[in-house]
Amino acid sequence: MIIAFLLTGGALAMLAWIVFNLAVYALPFFAGVSAASLAYAHGSGLVGAGLVGFAAGALVLALGRTTIAAVRSPTVRILILGVYAAPAAIAGFAVTKHIIAWTTPSEVWQTVFALAGGAVTAAVAYVRLTVVAPPDGPGMARDRDVVAPAFTVSSKG
């Protein structure tokens, strides 16, 4: 019985992790699903619709990241980040509200926890959209890792 409770708790934790990771990418996911639905409705077939949806979602995500990296105006950056973070906040709010409703009977506390979940999801979406990986990959030397030699050997002889 205890093992069943532990497995159920672990399964719920994994489900929540998956749902919140998807909520962070709510706008690209929605764009991909919309494009796939439109492509399927126009006769592209299931595989073609899936490819169109994947391409549309990836394009929306890449467009957002590229635009954030290229634009230097703080006002425009905030507006673009708001466009990406708002759907994530709504999705995070909804998911938290539904999950917390299983354990908390008070509507007020459900709303409080759901607001916190929406805010955290929006913050994670903001960070994931703005953080850019370093240009050098793992195992490559960085400037701070390169040690200059203490002396040089002359080849004149």
Image: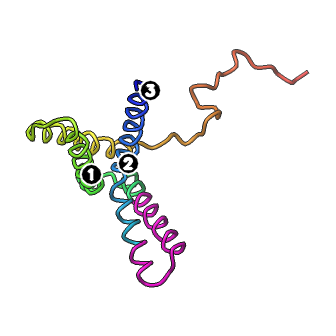
Snapshot quadrant of residue 155: top right
Q: Label 3 to label 2, Cα distance in Å?
A: 39 Å
Kindly give the residue lying farthest to the right in the view shown. 157
What residue type is disc 1 on? Ala
Find the magenta span and give its range: 36-63
* Left or right: 74, with 148 as reference point: left
Distance in Å between CA atoms under marks 2 and 1: 16 Å
Lower sequence index among marks 3 and 2:
3
Q: Residues within 10 Å of mark 3 (few under 14, many from 20)?
A: few
Q: Of marks 2 and 1, which one's residue comes earlier in the chain?
A: 1
Cα distance between the residues tagged 3 and 1: 32 Å
Q: Position of residue 138 (x, y in %)?
A: 61, 35
Report the residue that reaches farthest toward the bottom: 42
Considering the numbered disc 2 on the image, is that residue within a helix, a strand or a loop? helix
Residue 139 location, quadrant: top right
Which residue matches tag 1? 91
Q: Closer to the observer: label 2 or label 1?
A: 1
Give the main secondary structure, helix, strand or loop, of the magenta stretch: helix
**Quadrant for the N terminus in the image:** top left
The amino acid type, in three-letter code, at marker 2 is Leu
Which residue position holds label 3? 3
Task: Describe residue 35's horizontal placement relative to residue 146 as left or right.
Answer: left
Residue tagged 2? 129
Amino acid found under the numbered disc labelled 3: Ile
Screen quadrant of the C terminus: top right
Q: Nearer the viewer, mark 3 or mark 2?
A: 3
Q: Nearer the viewer, residue 29 or 108?
A: 108
Q: Tell which circle, 3 or 1, labels the residue nearer the N-terminal end.
A: 3
Within the image, what quadrant is residue 107 found in? top left
Image coords of residue 92 (percent x, y): 26, 47
